[in-house]
Amino acid sequence: MDIYVARQPIFDQEKKIYGYELLFRDSMKNLFSGIDGNTATSKVLSNSFLNIGIEKLVGKGVAFINFTRELLIEQVPKLFPSEQLVIEVLEDVKAEKDVVESCVELSKQGYTIALDDFFYNEGLTPLIAIANIIKFDFRATPPDQISEIIEKISKYNLMLLAEKVETNEEFDIALKMGFKYFQGYFFSKPEVVEGKDISPAKFNLLQIMAEVNQPYFEFSKVEETIARDVSISYKLMRYINSAYYKRGNEISSIKQAIVLLGERGIRSFLSLIAMAKLSDNKPDELIRSSIIRAKFCELMARHVEACKNTSELFTLGLFSSIDAILDDTMENIMAKLPLSENIKNALVTHTGELSYCLEMAKSYERGDWVRFNEIAKDHKVNQEKLPQSFLEAITWADAITEI
């Protein structure tokens, strides 16, 4: 069964991953089917905990999942571990007696309770008193109004979560307002872009990434490069012997590893090692999301008619967040690198034959099914195969990031 999954990252004050809100659809065909909340949440729960495996989706973090009035009253959350599940009480759920009693019981059982898309009214007081987390939508409510609401609920022992935080400026505002958690894609935007210059050390890493992603390179030179660097050699051996490959016999030589990985595999490996060094002062989720996107773009080539150059697609996905990693403009970075015009056009001007492949990957990651569907309609996309590709990309990223 195909499962459409997207994850909205949730960070703490140090920009470390706290968890993900999980967003599911049962198929792209049913995008506007008006599926009821009970069915939607039931699918989210069964798919994430029973079919896919919650660890694959959220790692060591927690899963934020929406719950309707009916599911709360039926105590459905109790079927799943409290240490991995955050119960999001939907904004249309009223603080009726049976709802409040159910939430009190769930709270006693150790479940974290969050009130979603919160806007204050006195009728919610019984739920506010039980809740652990209050979620404010930064797109729907201006910061000054949020401050007023925070003042009204200040007597309760609550943690504040800022939702739909899309820029670093918004992150800083929310941080100063006392928010503890932050949901959105602010981490994938450059923090400073004026007067920025790339250090020689970082530029060397960029050149390695660009060179190994050229159409042709010499395996012997690659072997030399790896052999000269103990750190890279060690990481290569760990990677090729990781659970992702599931080989019976351990690989013990660099040459063996290179042969087994092949041209595409060694390109990916060296690119990702270089990128990890470039992003050592950035949130872990930035490098992780770049890795997932690179692999997802590459795998998309199997199912998207016009996305056939897998080498370019991997590179495209990998470099798609390089501006945030280096806190520089994409134009400035691309001007210095020997990448193809196809890649540069897609990244800088969002044009060309690869641009829609990248846009489709981004909209899928975020669960923006409306935008995804718009793009898919204009191209020959085998949508039913993409869910498995996305999950495969997550699994591959796990293997890489553990190295």
Image (tube, helix red, strand yellow):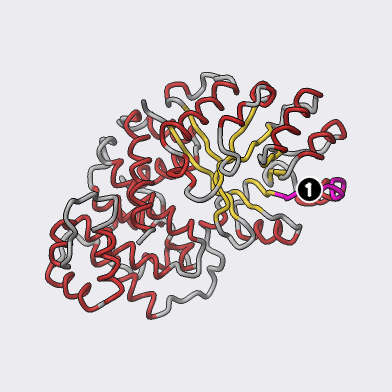
- Which secondary structure type mostly characterizes the magenta part of the structure? loop
Q: Residue at x 73, y 44 (%)?
A: 132
- Membership of 155 in magenta stretch: yes
Residue closest to the far front: 109
Q: Residue at x 20, y 75 (%)?
A: 227
Q: Amino acid at mark 1?
A: Ile
Residue 139 pos. (x, y %): 67, 44
Tell me which corner region of the image, top left, top right, bottom left or bottom right, holds residue 42: top right
Give left or right: position of 299 versus 6: left
Instruction: Classify 10 Å Cα crowding around label 1: few (below 14), some (14-19), many (20 and above).
Output: many
The number of numbered badges drawn on the structure is 1
Q: Which residue is mark 1?
A: 146
- Membership of 58 in magenta stretch: no
Between residue 95 and residue 383, name the one nearer to us: 95
Q: Is residue 21 above or below residue 45?
A: below
Secondary structure, mark 1, is helix
Residue 184 pos. (x, y %): 58, 49
Residue closest to the far bottom: 200
